[in-house]
Amino acid sequence: MLLEMTRAGAAAIGRLQHLARLREDCALNHESFVAEALPLIAEGAGCDRVSLWLYGPPRGAERVLHCRGLWVADSTVADLPVLVESAHPTYFAELDRRGILRAPEAQAHPALRSMRDAYLVPNDVRSLLDVPFAANGRRIGLLCAEQTGRTIDWQPSHVAFMRRAGITGTLLFQRLAEHESLGAAM
């Protein structure tokens, strides 16, 4: 069954693809691409906060997620901390088990308990949707949509949009990594 996106989601994907082409043509640098893409993702997901996370080098056997971009409507936020698997084991296990983390009631979600007091409550995050993306069969990052002040009952259309946005980002990040590898080899 093909999941349909909302009109806002489909329009945002079209603009994201245009940004990706501009980045590939070197008309945008990486930072500008992320800065312009994140509000489009928030618009398509219908939320007020979006972040891009990439898996970094593991710390021993532990997986680590680093925030590579954050967009927040009408406010500023300090940099987000690195997420280390040993500090958030139920969060990483939920992503592994379900392939996404859908939390309409984020502050009460068991997989987010380790983030509740330090992040969710102080930032008034009520709903959260994390959708990983992969390249060559390996998970390389995720997009996180959040809503403050009110909850969102994340629908299949939200998940479909976030997956599609992640695919657009995956292709770009994979090409950037290949380009950086070639540049380092020269």
Image (tube, rainbow, N blue to C red):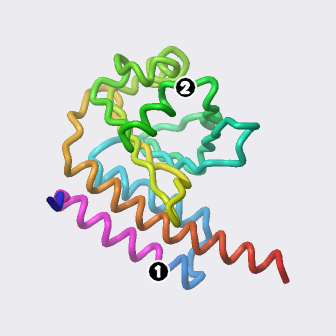
Check disc 2: other Cα within 10 Å, few if <14, some if 14-19, many if 20+: some
The residue range painted magenta reads 4-20
Q: Quadrant of residue 120?
A: top left
Check disc 1: other Cα within 10 Å, few if <14, some if 14-19, many if 20+: some
* Amino acid type, callout 2: Pro
The residue identified by callout 2 is: 89
Residue 5 among those drawn in magenta: yes
Residue beneath the point at 52% across and 66% down: 136
**Image quarter hosting the C terminus:** bottom right
- Callout 2–callout 1 Cβ contact below 8 Å: no
Say whether disc 2 or disc 1 marks the residue closer to the N-terminus.
1
Residue placed most toward the observer, 183 or 124: 183
Q: Main secondary structure of the magenta part?
A: helix
* Amino acid type, callout 1: Arg
Q: Secondary structure at mark 2?
A: helix
The disc placed on residue 21 is: 1
Residue 18 among those drawn in magenta: yes
Q: Quadrant of residue 94?
A: top left
Please say if 139 is above or below 129: below
Residue beneath the point at 53% across and 38% down: 76
**Image quarter hosting the N terminus:** bottom left
Residue beneath the point at 39% across and 73% down: 17
Residue beneath the point at 51% across and 33% down: 92
In this image, 87 relative to 34: left or right?
right
Judge whether residue 73 can be spotted in this image.
Answer: no
The picture places residue 151, in percent across and down from the top left corner, at: 25, 28
